[in-house]
Image (cartoon, rainbow, N blue to C red):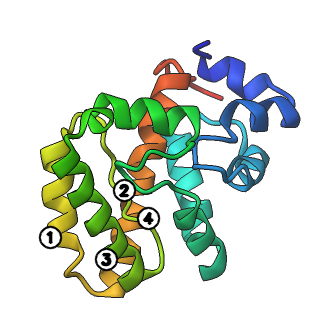
Amino acid sequence: MVLSMDDLNQLDKDQFVHELGDVFEHSPWVAKKAVAFRTFSSLQALHQRMVEIVNNAPFEEQLELIRAHPNLGEKIEMSDDSTKEQQGAGLQNLTVEEYNSFQSLNKAYMEKFGFPFIFAVKGKNKHDIHDAMKKRVNHTEEEEFETALSEIYKIALFRLQAKIAEDDVRGV
């Protein structure tokens, strides 16, 4: 069900968290903190506030958020949103060779950084993702931590756009 911004603003706290608790992968704490900042004038305003909440969170909470994401291309149980996103990028149709390459890169990435490779896959294909993995595994830990958060913010925006109609609430 797609909500209007007005509908979202009128939900009680528990309903708000229920609707938006999965926007940030397995991290309903972001929605729990965001509800205190209602009323949101637009989807963009809501997204920006949620990004600020994560940016202002302690390092440990940010790392936990990053680690809540699945490795791309793995055949594991994931959230419904992650499953749909990865299917949309063709990651469910990897050849054996591609699957092995993704696994190898995921392992090298995880060993180097201690968290999974994060990539907003909407509008991308398996080749785009694979190329990004090959490039980013050579980044510094600081670069990848920031890149992971940036990709998470993109994912959250895509998920919000799927849940909320883009009507602005003016004068609220």
**Nearer to us: label 1 or label 3:** 3
Residue farthest toward the top in the current orientation of the protein: 1
- Name the residue tied to disc 1: 135
Q: How far apart are marks 2 and 1 (CA)?
A: 15 Å
Is disc 2 in contact with disc 4, using a CB cutoff of under 8 Å?
Answer: yes
Circle 1 — which element? helix
What residue lies at 35% left-to-right and 86% top-to-bottom? 141
- Name the residue tied to disc 3: 108
Q: Nearer the viewer, residue 47 or 158?
A: 158
What residue lies at 44% left-to-right and 55% top-to-bottom? 152
Left or right side of 81 for 9: right
Q: Can see residue 56?
A: no
Q: Distance between the residues labelled 2 and 4?
A: 5 Å
Residue 73, labelled with which disc?
none
Quadrant into which the N terminus falls: top right
Left or right side of 98 for 20: right
Q: Distance between the residues labelled 1 and 3?
A: 12 Å
Q: What amino acid type is highlighted by mark number 2?
A: Glu
What residue lies at 58% left-to-right and 52% top-to-bottom? 49
What residue lies at 60% left-to-right and 81% top-to-bottom? 59
- Name the residue tied to disc 2: 151
**Nearer to us: label 2 or label 1:** 1
Residue 63: quadrant of the picture = bottom right
Name the spot of residue 99 as percent of width and height, x first: 26, 50
**Number of numbered discs on residues:** 4
Circle 3 — which element? helix
- Name the residue tied to disc 4: 149
Name the spot of residue 10 as percent of width and height, x first: 78, 23
